[in-house]
Image: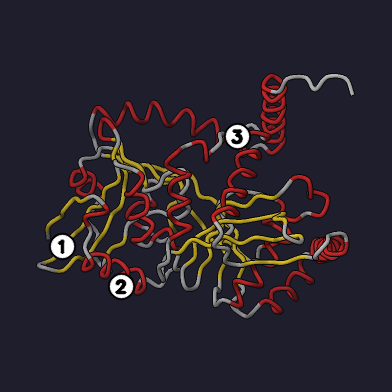
Amino acid sequence: MRVRIVRPGELGARETGAWRRLRAASGVPANPFMEPEFTLAVGAVRPAARVAVWWEGDEPVGFFPYEKGPLGRGRAIGFGVSDSQGGVFRPGLRPGTGALLRACGLVFWEYDNLEAGQTLFEGAADESFASPVIDVGEGYPAYEALLRAQSPKFLRTTLAKERKLARETDGGLRFVLDERDPAALRTLMAWKSAQYRRTGRGDRFAQQWISALVRRLHEQRAPGCSGLLSVLYAGDRPVAAHFGLRSASVLSCWFPAYDPAFAKYSPGLVLHLRMAEGAAGAGIRLLDLGRGAAEYKDSLKTGELTVYEGAVTRPDPRTVLHRLRRDPVRAAHAYVRARPALAARARGALNTAAALRGDRRTPPAGPR
């Protein structure tokens, strides 16, 4: 058994083919973040991206994508935006975390959305999180019937707002499951950036590599990992949009946003219902809404997956430095998450700070 470290772009057809076959045989949901095409896309915009490839004779039998930082620090590929992480190994291949880290030149590897079933890394998890999902495997009518039973007020209200928006809009409503127009993607990214700023969060699209990655994935067409931009139009005007990644059977939800001018119609909720309907019609069986609590996810979900946050290490003085930098921040976040009232106050403080920053940036409008 030997290990070869390569940049993602150095993977050949033989390696990527073996990677796909191992994933297909694993029996877990076909999350597009775990396919080689996602790693290849990250590698095109992140120079520190690497893949460790295990070979048995002349056959590739394991893959571990990661990003290598200073002082032996490693992170999951696409850390911060990837919603499913881990290694892809032939059944029975367990290299051990110490051997894996040494092979990659790492002393510390951090993850925040580790896929369930990654037993090599789960033991180092600090926390587990629910990732709500929508199962449309029996078709959209069956899903809507389930919503009528478990979230009747939510469904009734959302459908009523959809009808009202259609009545009050010239040209009615139109939904596009797979919008290819780059202008629609730019609109979504502008909405999302404004939302991040409005709520006091860091603007992900202000990071050039994330913007470049999303644009690249929007153009990508591969069976296991394709960008999917879904848009709800009122007449010719987009009012809500979502960009995610799809495989043959899973849609991994990623970046939803809407036009605040239409907020009273809840266009984002309407969009999610139409996405579920369109996805079911396209053969997708599962929509993964991603880690994180949100009222709309509770209303839409039919079940949950589990993801993990943590870090694997090996004995080395540099490990202490990485722990000292990471652990206090992680502990503070966990403390706030465990106290809903405190979390609500923290969100309120972020919103207030964002509003104050906005006031300083925007000159007074003057008398009206």
Q: Quadrant of residue 55?
A: bottom left
- Asked whether, in this view, residue 130 is left or right of residue 144, the answer is left
Residue under pointer 3 = 201
What colour-coding does the image apply?
secondary structure
Residue placed most toward the observer, 21 or 344: 21
The residue under label 3 is which amino acid type?
A: Arg
x and y percentages locating residue 96 in the rendered image: 24, 52
Which class describes the residues within 10 Å of circle 1: few (<14), some (14-19), or many (20+)?
some
Where residue 351 sits in the image (x, y, percent)? 70, 31
Q: Which mark is residue 21?
A: 2
Name the amino acid type tagged 1: Trp
Return the disc, 1 or 2, that comes first in the chain's sequence. Answer: 2
Q: Residues within 10 Å of mark 3 (few under 14, many from 20)?
A: some
Under circle 2, the secondary element is helix
Q: On residue 237, which mark appears? A: none
Q: Quadrant of the C terminus?
A: top right
Upstream in the sequence, badge 3 or badge 1? 1
The residue at 58%/52% (across/down) is 183
Residue visible at 44% across and 46% down? 212
Label 1 close to label 2 by CB (< 8 Å): no
Residue occupying image coordinates x 28% and y 54%: 64
Q: Residue at the location (85% across, 65% down)?
A: 163
Q: Of residues 343 and 267, which is closer to you in this image?
A: 267
Q: Is residue 315 above or below residue 38?
A: above
Residue 159 in the image: x percent, y percent? 81, 65
From the viewer's perspective, is residue 197 above or below residue 27?
above
Label 1 sits on a secondary structure element that is: strand
Q: Which residue has dot 1 on it?
A: 55
Proximity of marks 2 and 3: CB atoms separated by less than 8 Å? no
> Which is more foreground, mark 3 or mark 1?
3
Query: Element type at marker 3?
Result: loop
- Quarter holding the N terminus is bottom left
